[in-house]
Amino acid sequence: MDRFQAKLRSFFNNRWLVFVAAMWMQSCAGIGYLFGSISPVIKSSLGYNQRQIASLGVAKDLGDSVGFLAGSLCEILPLWAALLIGALQNLVGYGWVWLIITGRSPVLPLWAMCILIFIGNNGETYFNTAALVSCVQNFPKSRGPVVGILKGFAGLSGAILTQIYAMIHTPHHAALIFMVAVGPTMVVIALMFVVRPVGGHRQVRLSDSSSFTFIYSVCLLLAAYLMGVMLLEDLINLSRTVTTVFTVVLLLLLLVPIIIPLLLTFSSDDTSAQEPLLTVPQKEEASNSGQSTENHEVILSEVEDEKPKEVDLLPASERQKRIMQLQTRLFQAAAVGAVRVKRNRGPRRGEDFTLMQALIKADLWLLFLSLLFGSGSGLTVIDNLGQMSQSLGYEETHIFVSMISIWNFLGRIGGGYISEIIVRDHAYPRPVALAMAQILMAIGHFFFAMAWPGAMYVGTLLIGLGYGAHWSIVPAAASELFGLKNFGALYNFLTVANPAGSLVFSGLIASGIYDYEAEKQAHEHHNWTSLFRKLLYEAQVQEEKELKCQGAVCFFLSSLIMSGFCIVAVAFSMTLVYRTKIVYAHLYGKSQK
């Protein structure tokens, strides 16, 4: 019985269980991607026009990206408490919207509805921050894959939730809002005590690389499965039973990764890997020598950075013995002054920064501006994909929305994987992968501008991959350059670049050019109809209230501008690569020896 209880404790404290639980949580955390399905319900129920719906969309983008409070609370509160706050925000925000839509609550003015949408979507920032903070700390040597997979599931959550809603579809479309309010809240509350740091850096195993390979395989299978299901549902009128079967298979695919922590816990007798590296007698000896806890942490972090890579591959008992020997040498060196513990100075790149300390560093602003121009232009395409496809004569626009969601997911997975190869195998700065993604986006915007046959498919592919890659590369790079201690605050500062870029590209450039071309086309149409009115006075010509633009000219100039800004983003990324070569050589170069 005691042995079984020990196994259960080991399972609950397994870093792979935390990672899998974070993946499940992220699978329902991208509620903002469902706004395109929710907004028509709000528009028809409350009688809003498109300008008012656009205001709600801005509130949604701000709520999704402004996570300063979430980052701060994740630092001062237990992660379960921060997750609970996010879940309550999601429930209150979207729950109140559902009550208004269904007539159970009085209709509020537009500004109040914007606040509710902001509050509901802002809960997502708690989910993202808690998942990233806990898993990056548990996998400090695999930040690229971890961030890529978690952000990938967040990007795919819109498609996952849409498929689940297809199974429970009812004639009352407000049920989708109810599902958004209740579903993620229940999942997060169920997992909030599981997603947390568990000292994962002490749980390195020989099977870790194969475990990541298995996770990647599940991700690719999941993306291919969702793409196939979406195409079938688009082309064929499937029965309710078939849709239910497809959804059940989807849920089973999401459960498959739990196999990893189960096998690691119950098929192995090795539990010593989770024991503290510093035993009790050592702690007492260090305490008697008068050294502070802070000094111990510095020395132990040096052990983690300086130990040879092959130590992680040794059996647990031998690994612990080798690390203890290294600790002893460090303690002796510190006692005679051979190891200098640096104090009263600002942190250097690769150490732990506070947000205020990072804000005065050029590297943070280079990363921010690169993200603003790159991801901001990608979000503009996502927000305007319906109008872009309609202007080129495509009647069915949702197929491109579904496709860019899948490519976004694969871009996040691939960005984390490729950037990890760059830093692990070559000790080269991770932002070089960011520059590669932005080159893809520049080409994608150019295809949109040219509007060649099939350009929508190619552009959607390139923009989706490039945009998704940003959200696996940037958080990992930020954690490497500015440390893990205040990662939540730093990450949420960087996410502000997303709505800021969208505001500039979509709110000012793309929409302004689109309206100008639409008005010009309407004016030309008005001149011809005026001539016919004179010839046929009794014929009444009704002018459309809504201006629509047709043809490649609608997004030609704005796409070229965004392509140019992606090239500027490449320049920022490569500047960051040049500035951080030494940092990455220090972080990863030793593993090559």
Image (cartoon, grey):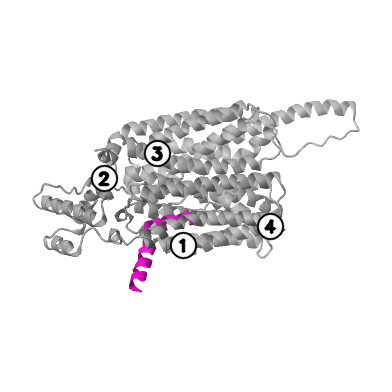
In the image, residue 311 sits, relative to residue 97, either above or below, namely above
Q: Report the predominant secondary structure element of the magenta stretch.
A: helix
Residue 419 image label = 3
- State if disc 2 and disc 4 touch (CB < 8 Å): no
Q: Where residue 371 sits in the image (x, y, percent)?
A: 45, 38
Read off the magenta span.
1-24
Q: Amino acid at mark 2?
A: Lys
Marks 1 and 2, the one that precedes in the sequence: 1
The residue located at (68%, 29%) in the rendering is: 551
- In this view, the residue in front, 33 or 98, is 33
- State if disc 4 and disc 3 touch (CB < 8 Å): no
In what quadrant of the picture does the N terminus appear? bottom left
Q: Amino acid at mark 3?
A: Ser
- For marks 2 and 3, give the one nearer the viewer: 2
Image quadrant assignment for residue 400: top right
Secondary structure category for the residue under label 2: helix
- State if disc 3 and disc 1 touch (CB < 8 Å): no
* 250 in the magenta segment: no
| Residue that protrudes farthest toward the bottom in the picture | 1
Secondary structure category for the residue under label 3: helix
User: How many residues crowd mark 3 within 10 Å: few (<14), some (14–19), many (20+)?
Assistant: many
Q: Where residue 204 sits in the image (x, y, percent)?
A: 31, 52
Q: CA distance from mark 1 to mark 2?
A: 33 Å
- In this view, the residue in front, 260 or 161, is 260
Q: Where residue 376 sits in the image (x, y, percent)?
A: 51, 38
In the image, residue 501 sits, relative to residue 155, either above or below, namely above
Marks 1 and 3, the one that precedes in the sequence: 1
Residue 191 image label = 1
- State if disc 3 and disc 2 touch (CB < 8 Å): no
* 20 in the magenta segment: yes
Q: Which residue is mark 2?
A: 309
